[in-house]
């Protein structure tokens, strides 16, 4: 009934719900369940798949202690879960059907691959061209051509370059494509707490606008790194970044477009100008911010001058005491 497999399947599908809800399985004892599972495994590992091996005593395949034990424990009830073909062989209809589906799917995929290759490359399965003819086209560009022309040189670099190259990260040695090594190194950086806080602030504003928004922890880590670049590489002010986040998530247009930190970084200059020019709200906010910053700087300067003055008076008092003169009032 079942086709002979060209290769044994690596794993047997086990549908837990179907197994647990089976009326036969529910009527089995624990020992009978063990018998049944072992027989299913044996049939899946057999060729053809789904058929119990011939030439073996079934009680041994079920891992019973003896034939008498198998019969006493209700082994026949377990065997009734299998069916017999015209040749009298026991098989599991479910496993046979599953394996036939796998075989048909694999054949379909193989045929589709062949048709795709033929449509793309116009190949009919036969070799083309003269193997003894002259090559055509231009030589490959360096350095790949040099490496292929002298494979031993690429395998065993000279001592002058090997020491330097051994210290540099190699994308080919790590299995990464060009440019991916930098991305991997970037992923290993731990964003500062300030960047993490701003990324979380952006997430909260987006979720407030759309409670169904799904933002994973991995995405949030990427956002924190984008914010880190805004602070370190773009030299953005953290307070300004927070203000732009709040503004763009209130704006009817931008709140539907700024849905990630990378988009925020890309559009930041435009967002900042829009914020400053939107009915003067941004100007007033930053005017208040600049005024507060100026007042803080003035207060800090006055405090510094006061400390310097006190230090000068203390120095003068010590000098006068050392000369025997009375300090100036």
Image (cartoon, rainbow, N blue to C red):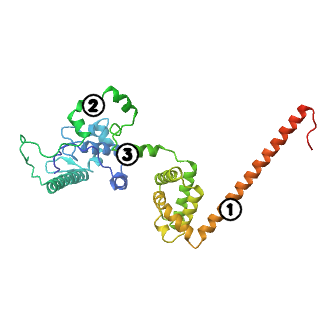
Residue extending farthest top: 159
Instruction: Report x, y in % for residue 3.
Output: 16, 49
Upstream in sequence: badge 2 or badge 3? 2
Q: Which mark is residue 324?
A: none
Q: Is residue 231 left or right of residue 300?
A: left
Instruction: Report x, y in % for residue 106.
Output: 20, 51
Q: Residue 122's quadrant in the figure?
A: bottom left
Identify residue for label 3: 180
Q: Are marks 2 and 1 in contact (CB under 8 Å)?
A: no
Nearer to us in this view, 266 or 294: 294
Image: 116 above or below 252: above
Single out the mark in the foreground, 2 or 1: 1
Please tell me how crowded label 2 is: few (under 14), some (14-19), or many (20+) other residues with Cα within 10 Å.
few
- Looking at the rendered image, the quarter that the C terminus falls into is top right
Q: Is residue 19 left or right of residue 83?
A: right
Q: Residue at x 46, y 43 (%)?
A: 188
Upstream in sequence: badge 1 or badge 3? 3
Q: CA distance from mark 1 to mark 3?
A: 46 Å
Identify residue for label 2: 155
Q: Residue at x 36, y 52 (%)?
A: 16
Q: Is residue 132 left or right of residue 47?
A: left
Instruction: Report x, y in % for residue 311.
Output: 81, 41
Label 2 sits on a secondary structure element that is helix
Q: Residue at x 49, y 44 (%)?
A: 189
Identify residue for label 1: 291
Instruction: Report x, y in % for residue 238.
Output: 58, 55
Specify whether residue 248 is in view.
no
Image: 220 above or below 73: below
């Amino acid at each position: 009934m079942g086709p002979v497999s060209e290769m044994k399947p690596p794993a047997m599908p086990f549908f837990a719900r179907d197994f647990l809800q089976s009326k036969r399985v529910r009527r089995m004892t624990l020992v009978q369940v063990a018998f049944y599972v072992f027989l299913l495994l044996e049939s899946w590992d057999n060729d053809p798949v789904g058929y119990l091996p011939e030439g073996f005593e079934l009680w041994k395949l079920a891992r019973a202690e003896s034939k008498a034990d198998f019969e006493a424990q209700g082994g026949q009830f377990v065997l009734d879960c299998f069916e017999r073909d015209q040749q009298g062989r026991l098989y599991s209809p479910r496993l046979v059907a599953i394996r036939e589906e796998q075989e048909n799917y694999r054949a379909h995929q193989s045929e589709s691959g062949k048709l795709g290759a033929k449509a793309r490359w116009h190949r009919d399965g036969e070799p083309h061209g003269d193997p003894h003819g002259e090559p055509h086209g231009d030589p490959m560009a360096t350095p790949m051509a040099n490496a292929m022309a002298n494979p031993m040189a690429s395998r065993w670099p000279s001592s002058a370059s090997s020491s330097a190259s051994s210290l540099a990260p190699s994308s080919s040695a790590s299995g990464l494509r060009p440019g991916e090594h930098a991305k991997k190194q970037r992923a290993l950086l731990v964003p500062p707490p300030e960047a993490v806080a701003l990324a979380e602030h952006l997430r909260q504003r987006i979720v407030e606008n759309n409670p169904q928004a799904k933002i994973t922890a991995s995405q949030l880590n990427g956002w924190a790194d984008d914010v880190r670049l805004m602070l370190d590489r773009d030299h953005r002010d953290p307070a300004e970044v927070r203000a732009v986040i709040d503004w763009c998530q209130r704006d009817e247009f931008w709140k539907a477009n700024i849905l990630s930190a990378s988009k925020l970084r890309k559009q930041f200059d435009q967002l900042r100008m829009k914020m400053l020019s939107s009915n003067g709200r941004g100007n007033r906010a930053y005017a208040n911010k600049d005024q507060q910053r100026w007042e803080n700087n003035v207060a800090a300067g006055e405090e510094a001058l006061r400390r310097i003055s006190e230090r000068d008076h203390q120095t003068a008092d010590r000098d006068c005491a050392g000369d025997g003169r009375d300090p100036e009032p």
